[in-house]
Image (spheres, grey):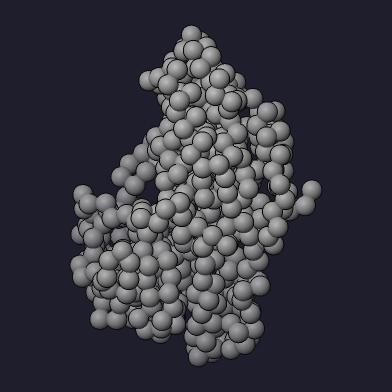
């Protein structure tokens, strides 16, 4: 089987809340338990669902976002992530045709399905309907002829009689029913202010939930029919995305005798990261070392650069604050001029305080939780040369938080937002680049290359060694 003909399905729904994550994660786990190598993917910028996908399959959950990365990169990124897999499953976002606000189909599940030439299986919440389900499915199947709606999984079915009525209605729709799942809250995943609780915060319970989901899928879905459908896909003509093709390690390492070591924050407080970021850092010539700010009292030995991504530091502010040795080490590294890239949670961690709890004190700002959700895609431009981006670099990003920072920008802001609103945001100070904006580096690999090159120069200036 060539890489372009990897069997694949897109799991979509008419709207949010229909059970896409439940069904997609359960399918991934069921097929993996059956011995298939399953590649998990998620439409959109969400970081949390891919954590459950990874738990179900044992492979990194990867995002496919046509707004952040551009439509032309979707198939190459998919082929890169799905290399060596027997089956790829792509969980959609929101409703099937819901895309970036005001931009038509861009970044919708339907858009990604077309880019991947993949059949769509629609998960329908059937809890409050019977014959109407056929009309709903007919509407979705006929809305866009380029989207191949090839099957339906009925979710939240109340009884055997309810299922019988639903199947009778669907007989005339021309779209086969590939599964029917009863209402069942036992395998649910808890939520809070930004969605599901990440796997890293409830791993043992998450393992049990995923196992229960797999059992429900095996009992209620026709896995053979789903796999046969996935194998009907045409060949994708694209070449797989290759991080090394976009970066020259020599540029980063010429200034230092060793690969610069970039420490990457992880653990329960910092779970938001795209898999391609670490791959790009390695391709740029770095050695990547993970660490957990909740547990580790020092940075990895020889750290010459730091990446602190998103997550939920507000849930762990007391514990992060109590780890004073690591806070001091981060502040010392930043003061040395070493490159530090911080997004959202990382921005809060670098501030003076979070909800009154002392943080690293790298940035002259105070952070606090709010009731207001800030959510949406953004377009931005780098306003000055810094350790992450050259002045004038244009990116697309995503904001997703319920916190506020005062002030919201430093004397040298990280970004000038250009759409959908115009404002400055974030901080640039020495080697520090800190912002609320989540950016997918696969869309702008120069960010990783610049960070690694800066780490190499900083290491060389300090004597080169670790």
Residue at the right extreme, as displayed: 1
The answer to whether residue 329 of the structure is visible from this angle is no
Residue at image position (20%, 67%) is 406
Q: Is residue 223 left or right of residue 300?
A: right
Residue under the image location 41 percent in, 83 percent down: 391
**Residue 359 appearing in the image:** yes
Q: List x then y, in percent, for residue 202.
A: 44, 41
Within the image, what quadrant is residue 247 found in?
bottom right
In this rendered view, identify the residue nearer to me: 420 or 193.
420
- Residue 10 placement: quadrant: top right
The x and y percentages for residue 415 are: 34, 74
Q: Residue at x 45, y 44 (%)?
A: 97
- Residue furthest out toward the top: 161
Can you give x and y, in whole percent of width and height, for residue 116 in the image? Answer: 61, 50
Question: What quarter of the picture does the C terminus occupy?
Answer: bottom right
Residue 124 x/y as whole percent? 47, 29
Looking at the image, residue 176 lies above or below residue 462 = above
Q: Is residue 151 left or right of residue 129?
A: right
Question: In the visual, does 268 lie left or right of 2?
Answer: left
Most foreground residue, 93 or 276: 93
Q: How many marks?
A: 0
Image point 54% across, 66% down: which residue?
442
Nearest the eye: 393 or 83: 393
Residue 199 lies, with reference to residue 83, above or below; the image says above
Say if 246 sits above or below 463 in the image. above
Check the image and report above or below for 341 versus 35. Answer: below
């Amino acid at each position: 089987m060539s890489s372009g003909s990897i069997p694949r399905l897109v799991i979509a729904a008419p709207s949010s809340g229909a059970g896409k994550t439940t069904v997609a994660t359960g399918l991934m786990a069921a097929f993996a338990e059956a011995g298939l190598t399953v590649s998990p993917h998620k439409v959109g910028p969400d970081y949390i669902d891919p954590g459950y996908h990874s738990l179900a399959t044992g492979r990194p959950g990867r995002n496919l976002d046509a707004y952040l990365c551009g439509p032309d990169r979707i198939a190459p990124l998919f082929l890169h992530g799905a290399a060596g897999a027997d089956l790829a499953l792509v969980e959609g976002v929101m409703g099937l045709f819901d895309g970036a606000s005001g931009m038509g189909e861009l970044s919708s599940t339907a858009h990604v399905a077309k880019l991947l030439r993949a059949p769509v299986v629609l998960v329908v919440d059937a809890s409050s309907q019977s014959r109407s389900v056929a009309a709903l499915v007919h509407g979705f199947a006929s809305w866009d002829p380029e989207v191949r709606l090839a099957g339906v999984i009925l979710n939240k079915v109340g009884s055997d009689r309810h299922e019988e009525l639903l199947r009778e209605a669907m007989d005339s729709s021309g779209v086969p029913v590939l599964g029917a799942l009863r209402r069942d809250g036992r395998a649910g995943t808890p939520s809070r202010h930004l969605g599901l609780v990440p796997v890293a915060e409830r791993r043992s319970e998450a393992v049990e939930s995923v196992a229960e989901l797999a059992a429900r899928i095996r009992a209620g879905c026709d896995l053979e029919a789903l796999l046969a459908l996935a194998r009907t896909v045409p060949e994708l003509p694209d070449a797989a995305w290759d991080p090394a093709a976009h970066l020259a390690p020599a540029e980063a390492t010429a200034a230092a005798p060793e690969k610069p070591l970039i420490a990457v924050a992880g653990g329960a407080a910092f779970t938001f990261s795209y898999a391609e970021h670490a791959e790009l850092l390695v391709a740029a010539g770095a050695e990547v070392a993970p660490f957990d700010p909740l547990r580790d009292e020092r940075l990895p030995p020889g750290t010459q650069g730091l990446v602190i991504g998103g997550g939920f530091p507000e849930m762990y502010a007391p514990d992060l604050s109590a780890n004073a040795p690591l806070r001091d080490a981060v502040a010392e590294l930043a003061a040395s001029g070493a490159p530090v890239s911080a997004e959202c949670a990382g921005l809060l961690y670098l501030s003076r305080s979070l909800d009154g709890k002392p943080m690293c004190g790298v940035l002259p700002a105070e952070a606090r939780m709010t009731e207001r959700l800030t959510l949406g895609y953004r377009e931005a431009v780098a306003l000055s040369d810094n350790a992450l981006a050259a002045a004038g670099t244009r990116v697309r990003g995503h904001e997703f938080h319920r916190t506020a920072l005062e002030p919201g920008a430093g004397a040298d802001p990280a970004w000038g937002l250009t759409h959908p609103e115009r404002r400055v945001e974030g901080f640039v100070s020495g080697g520090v680049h800190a912002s609320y904006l989540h950016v997918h580096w696969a869309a702008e690999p120069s960010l990783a290359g610049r960070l690694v090159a800066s780490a190499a120069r900083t290491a060389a200036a300090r004597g080169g060694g670790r």
